[in-house]
Amino acid sequence: MYDILLWLTGLAAVTCGLVGYLISRDVFHPLVFLGPMLAFSYFLTPLVLTSEGTIWRFLPADQMAFVQFFYLAGTLALAAGVMIGGYGGRWRPGKLALVPSWSARRQLRRAGLLLGGIGVAAFLYMIRNNGGLEATYSVAHGRGWSSTGYIREAFFLIVPALMLLLVANSGQRIRRADRRWIAVIASPLMLHGVLSAARGPTSMVLITLVVGWYMVRCRRPPLVLMAAGLGATGVLLLALVTSRSSIHLGGTFELSGFDRMLDFVGRATSGNEYILGSGIIINSRMTGSYEWGLAYLLTTVIRAIPRQVWPTQYEDTVAFFGMPGYDVRDTADFADTLGWTATNGAAAGLFAEVWQQFWWFGIILLFTIGWCYGRAWLLAVRRGGLWMMIHVIMLALSIFLTQQGFAPMLFRILFLGGAGWIVWRFMVRGRWHRPMALPPQFPQVAVPAGRQTLQAGGWHP
């Protein structure tokens, strides 16, 4: 039964990605990204693990049919949410929701440079705190440091900054000056992703630049090219994580081969995402212990309070809710039920985290997450502007959602999306629909009759 459910999960993930494209005709539909990621986590990885047989040292075979059934149900719930949230949307070549006025373009650039400057400054500050660039990246998986969490997360403001600069060029070729700014602002995130062999930052900057560049020009790559690009990105991320020991300043920078990557996927350890996630589901069923959203409360409300103000914020919150066994260090201990303890800091994945938080009610949460993805895509296609930025940020954070869990994505989407919304609200919104006179040298734009006309710097019906 387990094998049948495993193949059904893989089929469902791939089919949902394909159906999402066929209905929307958009290779940037959320399911085109989420489908392959779910197939990797809940089909390809366990397929390799079970072929070696080492997975059964950690997980009881008689429990795995239930676990895989929940993975299948979670895949279908997430996909259903995306489809319903984006119902009625369809991308049409050459049709942009709105081209901003010259005044709005100027404000978009200023907002992008503001967030980009904060992100780059945070990066430089953390590198300086850690002894400089060489000291930071002369060791494997190096990174800068700050005792303030807001500064550590401010580094990722580079993502909405890049989208603001790209949206400023909606409906036109990207200006040479903006290309230079984009290269400067993106370089710290790209540098960190490569030198630290970090999957998250690397995928974030690649998705932001590629998807954002196509969307603001109202173009899409062919489906075959998109599939090849996603596959190449996945191989790159695997190569980075399996070659971390050699990727650092002064190292050999040798990327691992396919055999080593396959060995990494099929290596049965207590830190493997599939093994850890399955262990969490089985342990919760055996003990009847569920957290009922505590992780999301800690991630959002409690984490937003600086430690300088409340040093024992996590411990006090856990004690208040009467869950003294909750480990704020993310170390899962299954010694009493499964006979092993998870690797410190290992991620469990989306479905296991949702099960641990809400039992079967987690299916509702998965549907809601998918609905949010679908709605953001629909508004990005229909309205553009701010929603285009939100949609790309959500796609960029998809790797955190599928590979680590909803909690790691939740605080980042609130922080990055919130920062983008704030600068949009106070710097752009008032000018988005406000036309300004075109300069004399601005060329006339040919527009199909009966559609829209370009007047005074903006598109108007």
Image (cartoon, helix red, strand yellow):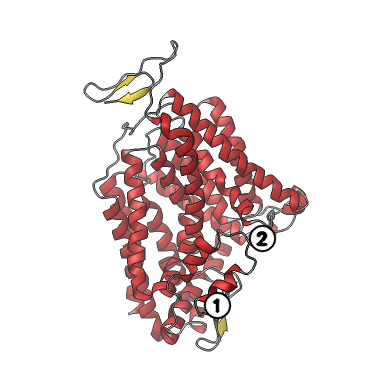
Q: Which residue is mark 2?
A: 308
Residue at 55% in and 31% down: 179
In the displayed structure, 160 sits above or below 311; it is above
Q: Farthest residue in the left direction?
A: 450
- Is residue 8 something that shows in the picture? yes
Check contact, mark 1 vs mark 2: CB within 8 A. Answer: no
Q: Quadrant of residue 84?
A: bottom left
| Residue 92 rendering spot, x and y as whole percentages | 29, 37
Q: Quadrant of residue 142?
A: bottom right
The front one of 157 and 32 is 157
> SS at mark 2?
loop
> SS at mark 1?
helix
Mark toward the start of the polypeptide (1 vs 2): 2
- Residue type indicated by callout 2: Gln
Number of marks drawn:
2
Residue at 57% in and 35% down: 113
Q: Which residue is mark 1?
A: 319
Determine whether, in the image, residue 131 is placed left or right of residue 419. Answer: right
- Residue type indicated by callout 1: Ala
The front one of 319 and 440 is 319
In the displayed structure, 334 sits above or below 425; it is below
Residue 306: mark:
none
Q: Farthest residue in the bottom direction?
A: 336
| Residue 269 rendering spot, x and y as whole percentages | 56, 75
Tell me the distance, in whole angstroms, between the alpha carbons under discs 1 and 2. 20 Å
